[in-house]
Amino acid sequence: MIIEMKDIWDFHTDLQNVQQIPVVNDYLLEQIDLPTAAHMGGLFNATCSKPGEPPPSANVPPDKLIADLDDQIRTIRAAEGLSLVLSAAELEGGGRQILHAEGIYFIRQVRDLDRLDWLWEQGFRSLAPLYNSDNALGGGSSGDPGRGLTRLGRDFAKTAWEKGFLLDCAHANHRTKEDFVDLALEIGHSLNYTHGFLGESILPRWGERGLPRKTARKLFKTGGLVGLSPHPGFLGTFKRYLEDIDTLAELAPDQLVLGSDFAGINVCGPDGNRLFEDCKGIWAVPSLAERLANRHGKDFARAFCGKTLKAYLQRTLPPGYGEPIHQENRIIVAP
């Protein structure tokens, strides 16, 4: 076997959806569960909206969004067998979680940027400013396609990078993704696309959720990673998933990773399936590694399924409390 469960690092899960008691949608447990997550190397655990509730938007009062986020943080911290990673020194072992905020809809003016300090103190190390709908920072994948990264969005990104956060453009529209990449190149920080697919979705409902090939090439120049999701609602067929991997492996094989979206795949593909027969949840990742080894070699398979993401985190997370953060030729003192 090329990899074991302990070797897997996943750039995006919604594991918190199966940490809720009771689990709202039992089919999510077919994608990943807590005992298995505890035996993985690690994963990104995204906060967004409570299961069964609408996603965050600019129409919801900021205090409610923050209260909901606080509830999710407590749930995530209480998970048995899992631990929260705050620095690179805590990456070793198993069951490691990186706290990732998906959709920052409570920063609406310059003074709200102080809330980034609160997010850091709560343990977040990765942020995605958009979650499909537009907000004060930029355009969401299902929003106005003409809306780009706003002036506040630029200030948000610069401030977040300076504090040491990783940033993710996965749920932004194409213009905002492009603006985000240009800003990252301009000031010398890496930008990630944690989970998704190349080009356009098989289902129109996802809007501009995918990553254009031209933008992918530029994003790789920032030093960031691209995570690809085996999501039938994005791709339609497992063959297309493998083809996306093939395409990007030719461009930047050492910047391509698994970003499964497991525990967050709610929408079925055209065939009525939430999982591909060839990739039925996190338990199928070792088999996926075998397929990738046949196409690209064992080293690539191990890198895609975990080694690349872990190495990136070792370079980009703060080494430890009170120690300097070295990031893209900058030195920042960690809180």
Image (cartoon, rainbow, N blue to C red):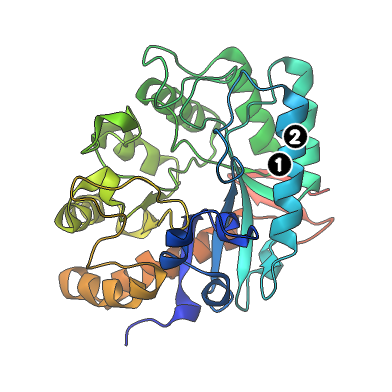
Position of 123 with respect to 200 (left or right) is right
- Residue of label 1: 69
Residue 216 picture location, percent across and down: 32, 39
Circle 1: residue type? Leu
Residue 4 picture location, percent across and down: 42, 83
Asked if labels 1 and 2 touch by Cβ distance under 8 angstroms, the answer is: yes
- Mark 1, residues whose alpha carbon is within 10 Å: few (<14), some, or many (≥20)? some
Out of 332 and 122, give the one closest to the viewer.
122
Query: Which residue corresponds to the image point at 57% horizontal and 59% vertical from the top-left?
Result: 23
State how far apart marks 2 and 1 are (Cα).
5 Å
Position of 265 with respect to 272 (left or right) is right
Does residue 86 appear anywhere in the picture? no
Out of 37 and 96, give the one closest to the viewer.
37
Which of the 4 image quadrants contains residue 85? bottom right
Residue 231: which disc? none
- Residue of label 2: 66
Relative vertical location of residue 141 with respect to residue 147 in this rendering, above or below: below
Query: Which residue corresponds to the image point at 61% horizontal and 29% vertical from the top-left?
Result: 157
Residue 275 picture location, percent across and down: 30, 59
Q: Considering the numbered disc 1 on the image, is that residue within a helix, a strand or a loop?
A: helix
Out of 125 and 58, give the one closest to the viewer.
58
Residue 72 picture location, percent across and down: 70, 49
Circle 2: residue type? Ile
Relative vertical location of residue 163 with respect to residue 238 in this rendering, above or below: above
Out of 166 and 190, give the one closest to the viewer.
166
Position of 195 with respect to 15 (left or right) is left
Query: Which residue corresponds to the image point at 44% horizontal and 40% vertical from the top-left?
Result: 222
Total numbered badges shown on the rendered structure:
2
